[in-house]
Image: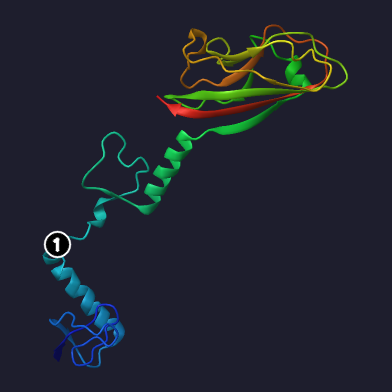
Amino acid sequence: MRTADICPTCATYINALCVIYNGVYLSTIDVEPLDSLEVALGKINTFLGTIQPSLGFTPENVANKSTDITLGGATPSDVLYPSQKAVKNYVDAAISASSFTTVKVSLTSADILALDFSAPFTLIAAPGAGKFINVQSIYFKLNFGTTPYSNVTIAVNLGPITGVVSGMSALLDASVDTFHTGGVYPSSSPIASPVANTALEITTSAPPTGGDGTLDVYITYNVISL
């Protein structure tokens, strides 16, 4: 048996020198002249494990690895360390929460004729407990058929009764294809108060009559956690 200087990168020794790096390495590792690369690397790994504290660091305890995608939420830890996937999911969720999404929701003629204040049509489903839909903009596109609808007021609400978000008239009774911004009421307005875990819905002041066109609603929004 001999004591040789072994390079931790290539495990090659010639007269105690690494033939690749040309430097002295780990002179206290016992390596047999005929040790295979696998055996030599195993001895290096064992040796590194014994000297890590003296090098100024201690390997992480794998029992402390966490896959919590909230990274501890309101009570983060100085002991646990996250997995790569947990960090990715956390960052993806943070980006998603801060960015806006635009969706197109289409109503058929049957959907329009069924609208009423007490019979809303869901544009975006309720987002879940402790969250609300923050609407940035709304646009309407009436695709005229052959007959206009009666003139009724359209309202977009957070829920069928509370939190009016947008409203307009003189759209469904148009006799040509019509594109119109619904506008979004300012958040300081009492009728625009956001409601947690409430769906975004469209209603009318009264049931429309006649008409056979369709309606596309374009909504830009994000979901905010309270």
Q: Helix or strand or loop: what does disc 1 sit on? A: loop
Q: Is residue 120 visible?
A: no
Residue 52 quadrant: bottom left
Residue 68 in percent (x, y) is at 34, 44
Quadrant assignment, res 116: top right
Residue 23's place in the image compared with 1, above or below, is: above
Name the residue located 17 percent from the left edge and 60 percent from the top edge.
Answer: 58
Q: Nearer the viewer, residue 130 or 57?
A: 57
Residue at 41% across / 48% down in the picture?
88
Q: Residue furthest top?
A: 206
As drawn, 164 above or below 99: above
Q: Which residue corresponds to mark 1?
A: 56
Q: Amino acid at mark 1?
A: Gly
Q: Is residue 67 left or right of residue 47?
A: right
Residue 128 placement, left or right of 123: left
Classify residue 149 as left or right of residue 68: right
Q: Which quadrant is the N terminus positioned in?
A: bottom left
On the question of residue 128 being in view, the answer is yes
What's the residue at 76%, 10% (across, down)? 208
Circle 1: is it few (<14), some (14-19), or many (20+) Cα within 10 Å? few
